[in-house]
Image (spheres, rainbow, N blue to C red):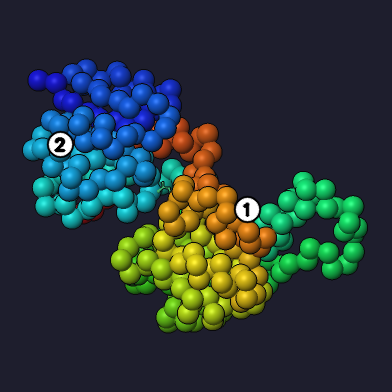
Amino acid sequence: QKHKVVVTRQLIDEAQKLLESVPGLNIVQWPTEQPADRKWLLENAKGASGILLMLSDICDEELIKAAGDSLKVIASFSVGTDHVDRDALKKRGIRLGYTPTCLTDAVADLTIMLILMAQRRGGEAISKVQTGQWPKMPWSPLLMTGPQIRGSTIGFLGFGRIGQATLKRLLPFGISRVVYLTSEPGQLVKEDHFGLIKGAAIPIEPAKDWEQLACESDVLIVGCALTRSTKHLISTNFLSRMKKLSVLVNIARGPVVDTDALVAALDKGEIFGAGLDVIENEPNILANHPILKQPRCVLVPHIGSATIETREQMATESVKNLLAGLKGEPMVNEVEL
Ligand code: GLV
Ligand code: GLV
């Protein structure tokens, strides 16, 4: 009997070949590079044993019910799993695969780009040159100045693999101190992914609460999962406690930051700038959205993991997770539900 698997995107060469090489699979695949249509997904899920989906595909009760009792595995092409109703999967014993390790370097690299763009006013600078304003603003000592990364205190909201890989990149810049807040501070010693935390040459300390994180960070990096308790954690209140020369970088999920509060904080000069890879209601940000009128905010369209190498690995790992789920074998990375 053939296993039906639904795949919500065309995959990159190697991953696609791997998927097609498996005997006994009935592969139903969304034909384009665009996000799969929800109606298509619900209709085709019926009788599926496995679904490989993207972070733009919501995996909720409705989809799980549409698939029916045959469903064994969801393989998500992502590190984040906030688009998946984990409780609904757990209740039915459906396994969840994800790709948390292969994208760490790519996202940490982009985090560095956003920190520097925010501190050194990269977006504003490029836009001035492109709109022909350079002739009106010749070189001068204070032209486009911003805070320096050397000596900065780096705050991490969420301090897992990506945060720690970002720290690894930041140490050679001469940062002076790290303060972090995680949901399970006790876990960190065990999860010192790069052996940086124990024996680091600079202080790396847990914040006692969010207020301390807000007050002390020169660079605040949002790298936590989106959950009920992290939604809008970066609020008006939080932003009002940040330093005037501080920058906020979000490489996690848009809703962790209250966008209206961020716009207001930038307007009032409560923080120096922001670098965002994600935003609430993405990708539906219209050209007249007030965040796009903030010269000190750099917003890129959720490209954290977008290196060629990483996307190939994510695709291949997702297929491996899907196949392992069908066979009842260990996955490359499985979420503990
Ligand atoms: C990207 O945001 C991911 O979750 O993989
Ligand atoms: C900058 O270009 C300088 O020469 O200081």
Q: Where does label 2 land, which residue?
A: 67
Q: Position of residue 255 (x, y in %)?
A: 41, 61
Q: Position of residue 104 (x, y in %)?
A: 47, 49
Q: In the image shown, does 298 or 25 lie closer to the viewer?
A: 298
Q: Residues within 10 Å of mark 1 (few under 14, many from 20)?
A: some
Position above or below: 171 against 328: below
The answer to whether residue 278 shows anywhere in this view is yes
The part of the image, by quadrant, that contains residue 188 is: bottom left
Disc 2 from disc 1: Cα separation: 41 Å
Q: In the image shown, does 305 or 102 lie closer to the viewer?
A: 305
The dot on residue 241 is none
What's under tag 2, amino acid-wise?
Answer: Ala
SS state under label 1: helix
Position above or below: 229 against 28: below
Instruction: Locate the C terminus by quadrant.
Output: bottom left
Q: Is 174 positioned to the left or the right of 52 in the image?
A: right
Instruction: Locate the N terminus by quadrant.
Output: top left
Q: Position of residue 281 (x, y in %)?
A: 43, 54
The residue drawn where x is 15% and y is 36% is 67
User: Mark 2 vs mark 1: which is more N-terminal?
Assistant: 2
The dot on residue 113 is 1
The mark tally for this picture is 2
